[in-house]
Image (tube, grey):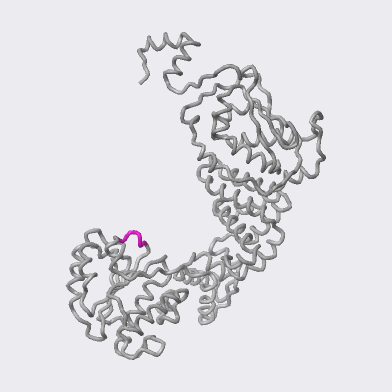
Amino acid sequence: MDSFVVSARKYRPTTFESVVGQDTIAMTLKNAIRRKQLAHAYLFCGPRGVGKTTCARIFAKTINCQHPSDTLEACGECESCRSFAEGRSYAIHELDAASNNSVDDIRNLADQVRVPPQIGLYSVYIIDEVHMLSPAAFNAFLKTLEEPPAHALFILATTEKHKIIPTILSRCQIYDFNRISIDGMVRYLKEIAEKEKVAVDDAALNIIAQKADGAMRDALSLFDQAVAFCGPSISYGAIIKNLHVVDYKYYFSLTDHCLAHRYADALLLFDEVLSKGFDALHFVAGLSEHFRNLLVCKDAATVKLFESGEAFKKDYLTQTTKCEASFLFAALGITNACEMTYKSSSNPRLHVELALLRLSNIGGERRSTVAQPATPASSTPATAALPPTPVSDAPPPPVSISLKDTLTPKAKVAAAAPPPPAASQADFTPAQLQAAWQRYIASIGHRQRMVAMLENLTPQLEDRYTVHITLPHDSLQRLIEEESKAEMLDFLRRELHNSRLSLSLSVAPSEAEESTELLYSPMQQLNYLNAHYPAVEKLKQELELDIK
């Protein structure tokens, strides 16, 4: 146990050639060495575990190497290379800005910079997590960083470049490191597995690479964890159990259930996922990623965007042939909306189950429209898409329209209403129109005032493509035209699969002649209440109330 070294340290790259996923940066640094165009300050920034400090060490070792190779790699045999490898080099200094972030620490560094190196040409100062320096320390560092001695060279490393003040950034050459690709990590892990004599399949390595999220150090740590759990043979089943990852088979099966509209099987599969201890939100996020991968695999031009590794690409290419692009667009919209509203839901499980029901019903309305013959307007349909709304004898709730609600900018409405989908001319029955109308009202449930006004309206089918709504007064007509007409029309077009559908509004003749005044201000509202309810004025006087 005493001799064990974790893979992240044991297999840390020692040459530019062995660095994974940063070929451009490695080539740039080597060219600077070859042309003797070394800057006095560099800033290496990027996500964790992508090789910033590693490249800084390799660069520092190479520029001090006494016998570099033709490919500009350190020889590893000269006194400078040996002292660096043994940790006794006085030419390469590493500082942790997280624990040395005060003005005094920077002053000590400025004093140390004046001392020339004993071996090699440069004294290299690698400052890790430089964004942790205090503002005063940054300011104290400016002069030293801008005009250091000829033998001094600074390499700053950070994961949060936005926290570094601009005056520091302007004094450095900035190198942005990339996240390591999944394929690059898989290849490197394969090499390490061969050296460690560990048998592992590509699917297991893909899971490790995805879990690492672009950080090679995290991938090597997960590899060590998998070896500790599985021993010298790592399988896909063992790795998803050890790392607590949802099996990809669940996503493929769920997609098949949704395509076949088997909502019961989809709910049972979700229950099985929950029974194994997986988080519902994590499952939905994985499902969104699954639909995204299916979408990019559908077009040969976007297959290169596939990010789940070659081990699963064949399965995705097979399933994507079963999915229409419209299904994937709608599925991504449903899962994304579910993710966004998950944390605000009072019943998270039901929230996800409703999303699965919507996924299972994608295209359901289109099928019912094609299957049912057109029903005359005078006949009563046998079935309806939604159950009829129960009729209540209670009077409708009072409607209060505020100035803010009424004066909604038209530009906002226009921006919120996307253009209709590709031209379609599917016929629809009055019953289907009423069902779509109820679904629209349900979709704007958070706008209570508008719902209260629309619940008592009944759209009528004037002809094949025209829907007419009769309104009780002209103020409601103005409100709908300014705020909701474009959104309402777009919703009905999508639900009824008819892009030629138009919407007309009119005011009932008995009300059209009257001029209904909107109660904009509090004083107008109070006068209205006093005129209709005299007790309000009496209560106001007794309690000595007034409007501010």
Front-most of residues 548 and 157: 548
**Segment colored magenta:** 160-164
Front-most of residues 300 and 220: 300
User: Is 315 contained in the magenta span?
Assistant: no
The part of the image, by quadrant, that contains residue 53 is bottom left
Place of residue 502 in the rendered image (x, y in percent of width and height, measured from the top left):
67, 37
Identity of the residue drawn at 34% across and 84% down: 35
User: Is 162 contained in the magenta span?
Assistant: yes
Dominant secondary structure of the magenta stretch?
A: helix
Place of residue 209 in the rendered image (x, y in percent of width and height, measured from the top left):
52, 68
The part of the image, by quadrant, that contains residue 420 is top right
- Whether residue 85 is visible: no
Identity of the residue drawn at 59% across and 73% down: 202
Q: Residue furthest front?
A: 513
The image shows residue 30, relative to residue 98, as above or below, that is below
The image shows residue 523, relative to residue 500, as above or below, that is above
Place of residue 105 in the rendered image (x, y in percent of width and height, measured from the top left):
21, 66
Front-most of residues 464 and 247: 464
Quick check: 470 left or right of 134? right
Instruction: Classify the position of the C terminus by image quarter.
Output: top left
Instruction: Classify the position of the N terminus by image quarter.
Output: bottom left
In the rendered picture of this protein, how many numbered marks are placed on residues?
0
